[in-house]
Amino acid sequence: MIIIQFLLGASLASFFNLVALRDARGESIVRPRSHCDTCQMQLAAYDLIPVLSYIILIGKCRYCKSSLSATFFFNELMLGIALASLNIQHTNLPFMLSLIMMAFLSSFDLVQK
Ligand SMILES: [Zn+2]
């Protein structure tokens, strides 16, 4: 159960990062497909696995070797750990939803420069 909770948290954070980044750029969250900001190559599904892809690629784009954002990686890692550390059976829903909402809002803070 802990692994599923971690994957859920990391996936949510990954989506929150996408929403915040694309909102800042005025882009749709659907199109264009996920791509490298430097070389514009579309990323394959296996390049988009939260936390794991960053570790496998050692924080670099598969195609042009430019550095990927460590901030987004740590954001995914932290929400994954946060949700994995919750005892779901003894955590009330409003607490969990407020934690997820705060993570969503903090993604917008991470994108602001
Ligand atoms: Zn690239």
Image (cartoon, rainbow, N blue to C red):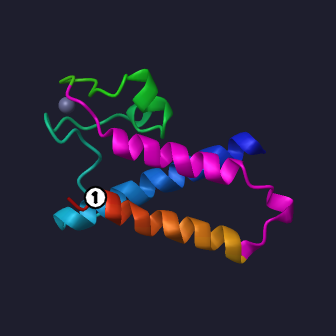
Nearest the camera: 37 or 94? 94
| Residue 90, image x, y percentages | 85, 64
Residue, x 79% and y 66% (percent of image)? Answer: 91
**Residue 14 visible in the shown view:** yes
| Residue 94, image x, y percentages | 69, 77
Q: From what the image shows, is residue 50 above or below residue 94? A: above
Residue, x 67% and y 68% (percent of image)? Answer: 96
Magenta part of the chain? 66-93
Magenta stretch, main secondary structure class: helix
Q: Quadrant of ligand 1?
A: top left
Query: Looking at the image, which residue sits at the far right?
Result: 89
Nearest the camera: 41 or 52? 52
Does the segment drawn in magenta span residue 80?
yes
Quadrant (top left/top right/bottom left/bottom right) for the C terminus = bottom left
Query: Label 1's element?
Result: helix
Nearest the camera: 76 or 19? 76
Left or right of 58, for residue 22? left
Q: Residues within 10 Å of mark 1 (few under 14, many from 20)?
A: some
| Residue 101, image x, y percentages | 53, 71
Residue 87: which quarter of the image? bottom right
Query: Looking at the image, which residue sits at the far left?
Result: 39
Q: From what the image shows, is residue 108 above or below residue 43? A: below
Does the segment drawn in magenta span residue 102?
no
Q: From what the image shows, is residue 13 above or below residue 7? A: below
Left or right of 83, for residue 69? left
Reading the image, the residue beneath label 1 is 111
Quadrant (top left/top right/bottom left/bottom right) for the N terminus = top right
Q: Amino acid at mark 1?
A: Val
Residue 48: which quarter of the image? top left
| Residue 59, image x, y percentages | 34, 28
